[in-house]
Amino acid sequence: MNQTFNKQPVAFVTGASSGFGLLTSVALAGEGYRVLASMRNLTNKGRLEAAAKEAGVADRIEIVQLDVTDFSAAETVIQDVIRRYGQIDLLVNNAGYAAGGFTEELAIEEWQRQFETNFFGLVAVTKAVLPSMRERRSGKIVNISSISGRIGFPSMGPYVSSKFAVEGFSESLRLEMLPYSVHVVLIEPGSYKTDIWSKGLGAVTIRPNSPYVKEMKAILKYVNKIAEAAPAPDEVIRQIVQVAKSPSPKLRYPVGKGVKLGIILKNILPWKWWERIVTKRLWKG
């Protein structure tokens, strides 16, 4: 174990090459954490290195290679970190992407890929840290979910489904781990300026002969409007840091404009009313 850092809390972050993962890594390093920032492809580490250097925390961030869909690698990488630093105090499961399109037109392989990363990869990394956290009776697992983990949205079936799965998994795991003082937390952001939408919906091609041309165009227009107006993700990062510092965080933290209201309305309104609101906003907006 590296004696220089053994008094520092240790955080492991997945999907740290951009977006929430990058910003969380830098913020946690700024709070005194030793951060293991993992990413699938190390050729994408430039942005994180630049941000860490600018924030003066480059010496507290170690970039490691991890493709979360390589489940045995997840186990190996996590065990190596625990061997070197003695523990992982905080796991932030952030790796993920958004696959978009209408269900009829999406190959089943696209659904599988979405779940491999957003759900099974998250479970694999989490399973790797559990024995150590349970034995120490200490630790936090922060799963980056989404408003899409609470509210379905047309043309985002794979992403929504994967986030609903993360929500159910986190509820179950929370109850399993509470007796061991390990806290499982869901962060549920709304729309923010990150690469996820441009990468996800940017990959959606509208086939000229598709029966959904009209609907897809309406959705892309709606999403682009939201993306343009979306704020920088600072409040999401602040929430993650707050959870990291809290001795007993809650299960769920919805973050962003209209997110809490959307969840409340969906839960209390008759489904037919909710349907009407969504379809009116999308198809007639």
Image (cartoon, grey):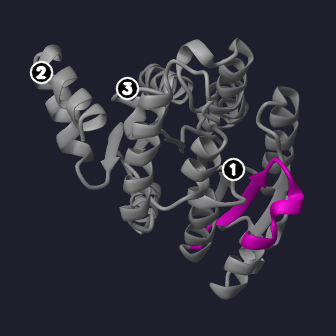
Element marked by disc 3: loop
Label at residue 15: 1
Residue range (magenta): 32-47
Residue matched to label 2: 273
**Among numbered discs 3 and 2, the one appearing first in the sequence:** 3
Q: Position of residue 90 (x, y in %)?
A: 58, 50
**Among numbered discs 1 and 2, the one appearing first in the sequence:** 1
Which amino acid type corresponds to the residue marked 3 in the rendered image?
Answer: Gly
Element marked by disc 2: helix
**Among numbered discs 3 and 1, the one appearing first in the sequence:** 1
Which amino acid type corresponds to the residue marked 1 in the rendered image?
Answer: Gly
Q: Disc 1 vs disc 2: which is toward the camera?
A: 2
Whether residue 263 is in magenta: the answer is: no
Which amino acid type corresponds to the residue marked 2 in the rendered image?
Answer: Trp
Q: Position of residue 245 (x, y in %)?
A: 43, 60
Label at residue 152: 3
Whether residue 42 is in magenta: the answer is: yes
Q: Measuring 85% from the left and 58% from the top, which residue is drawn there?
A: 1
